[in-house]
Image (tube, rainbow, N blue to C red):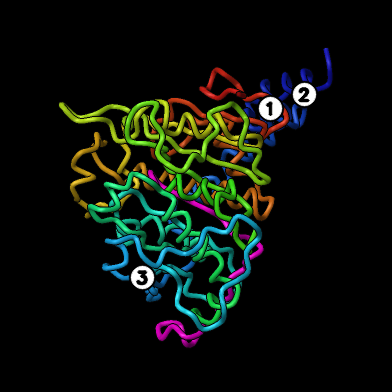
Amino acid sequence: MNLAQISCRRAWVQSTLLQCLVLALLSFPSLALRLTDVSDADLDNIYDPGKYATQKFTVSGSDSWWNDVWGLGVPVCQKVASSPSASGVKPARTLLVMVPRSSGEYPVVQLQHGFTLETRHYSQLMTHIASHGYIVVAPQMPGDLFEMMRADASNEISYAAAVVDWYPKNLADALLREKTLLSLRIKPNLEKLVLVGHSRGGKVAFGLATEFCKTSLPYSAIVGLDPVDGVLENTSLKPQVLPYQPNSLHLKYPTMIIGAALGPIGLPLMPPCAPKGVNHEAFFEDSSPAAVHFVVEDYGHMDFLDDSVWTTSTMLCTRGRTRGPMRRFSGGIAIGFLEAVLFNNTKAFNYYLENPRQVPTVTLSTAYDKGWSDSPASTETGVSSA
């Protein structure tokens, strides 16, 4: 009989269950650590609004409806390392910007919206990310009928790259000039630049990540929100971004993919909004380590958007009962991922990756880890190494 057993028997005789529990935890330090992690409020804080109030404003771009219709004024897609835009020029697209209302230096997140959608449709998601200490910039891409007929995301990738090249000599000045922020000193940390893309915007983000168009700044991480590479099953749109070979992207930074389980399910007589073969599964399969993949049950392709958004696109997609839980999970796990990648604060993200059933807002059907952690996650909780 070892010392821990003897101590526990004495504690039991004295009817002091708490003493026995403490002694047992001291005998198994790893168990004590895990219980401490579970009870830590920081785990849930990533899903709650952050400590910062936020401010939204617009930076007018050089885009115009006429140019969008005729495909004019598209920036040159640089195939070699590009240079930053000149100081004092307008960005290539109009920008919706969300910032913390507190002086400081913050990482920059570039959010690429989905097909035929608008940047304002993501205000609630942008607010959540900004409230945790991030500058979120969403460029408005062309989204008219003519863009639909082109079935080609090359122009959007060119525009997105031009926005990135605008940052070094202009973003800080735009923050200083913004009237609603005159009393603050908000600085962008362009050494921590993150790409986020939803739907077709996911293809655009990966177009930047894979250097279809090169930019003057490097990236630190990429997040795909139910990304799609085409509109029909197993049929990708131009340009080719995914090689459709496992582990073939070879990105130099971590990748996170969030998939909506209802995305591949179409409404009656309608094609699905995130068809099999070109959806989140393809993006994750092609991603190289370190990459993680979450698939959310009972939610659809457009459930990342604001509650008030109802467009033709949203009506044509299979959806969940409400968007709030999906949006809260996506924003929260994105914060956990970015805190892990940018600041080496891995506690919350690793906990939910290893314990997906503990996610407080949604049910995950799968959570995959491809080279993120050194040891395989438990398959009993729906997590596996791929």
Q: How far apart are marks 2 and 3 (CA)?
A: 74 Å
Residue shown at 34% from the left, 34% from the top:
274
Quadrant for the N terminus, please.
Answer: top right
Q: Which amino acid does label 3 sit on?
A: Asp
Q: SS for tag 1?
A: helix
Q: In this view, does 59 lie to the left or right of 83?
A: left
In the rendered image, which residue does mark 1 sit on?
20
347 or 77, nearer to the observer: 77
In the rendered image, which residue does mark 2 sit on?
7
The image quarter in which residue 127 lies: bottom left
The image quarter in which residue 321 lies: top left
Marked residue nearer the N-terminal end (2 or 3)? 2
Marked residue nearer the N-terminal end (2 or 1)? 2
Residue 153 position within the rendered picture, expressed as x and y whole percent measured from the top left: 41, 48
| Magenta-colored span | 176-200
Q: Can you tell which of label 1 and label 3 is closer to the viewer?
A: 3
Q: Can you tell which of label 2 and label 3 is closer to the viewer?
A: 3
Residue 147 position within the rendered picture, expressed as x and y whole percent measured from the top left: 30, 52
Quadrant for the C terminus, please.
Answer: top right
In the rendered image, which residue does mark 3 sit on?
63
Residue shown at 57% from the left, 27% from the top:
245
Q: Marks 1 and 2: in contact by CB < 8 Å?
A: yes
Q: Is residue 293 left or right of residue 330?
A: right
Q: SS for tag 3?
A: loop
